[in-house]
Amino acid sequence: MGDKVCVGAITGAFGVRGEVRVKSFCADPAAIGDYGPLSDADNRRAFTLTITRPVKGGFAVRLSGVKTKEEADALKGTRLYAARDALPALPDDEFYQADLVGLAVVDTGGVARGQVHAVLNHGAGDLLEVRRKGQSATTLVPFTKEIVPTVDLSSGQIVVDPPDGLFEGD
């Protein structure tokens, strides 16, 4: 687990005065501005974020140090990270997505299935992208209590109870 958690991404410029459009990854999307200065992935830049208004797909945001449309355009695709200690503590049955990436995946019989490569959400719920053991292929596993009954961060593994055929070809 790193010392930073991705809480959003800049999806482009908004208007001509240096505002950007930000997609929030927070449970409460408007809380993205509550976690102190946000940084880019390399910690090269830090931004104080001020939400100016909600817009389709996120928020129009003013970032400190960004004054022109050209500066805002150059930030498109930048992921925004908050310090882990600035984020709220979570109950035992909740996780930051960043904490799941890299965990080993085993089935209920103890057979190693792979490793979590990414956590995705295309609108119908979270999916774990599992890179299969010894392969470059991935399998998308619905992140539900029925299919993923156990997440054990301390042991670094996730137990899955996959439906028939999910890991076909293993």
Image: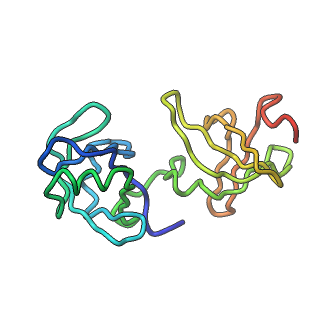
Say if 55 sits above or below 119 in the image.
above
Q: Position of residue 52 (x, y in %)?
A: 14, 44
Q: Which image quarter holds the C terminus?
A: top right
Q: Nearer the viewer, residue 104 or 110?
A: 104
Q: Position of residue 32 (x, y in %)?
A: 29, 50
Q: Nearer the viewer, residue 43 or 105?
A: 43
Which residue is the extreme one toward the front? 70
Task: Tell me the residue at 82%/28% (across/down).
Answer: 164
Q: Is residue 70 left or right of residue 99?
A: left
Q: Is residue 69 left or right of residue 111?
A: left
Q: Quadrant of residue 141?
A: top right
Q: Which image quarter holds the N terminus?
A: bottom right
Q: Position of residue 57 (x, y in %)?
A: 32, 34
Q: Position of residue 63 (x, y in %)?
A: 20, 57
Q: Quadrant of residue 35?
A: bottom left
Count how many numbered circles sit on residues in the image: 0
Say if 64 sits above or below 56 in the image.
below
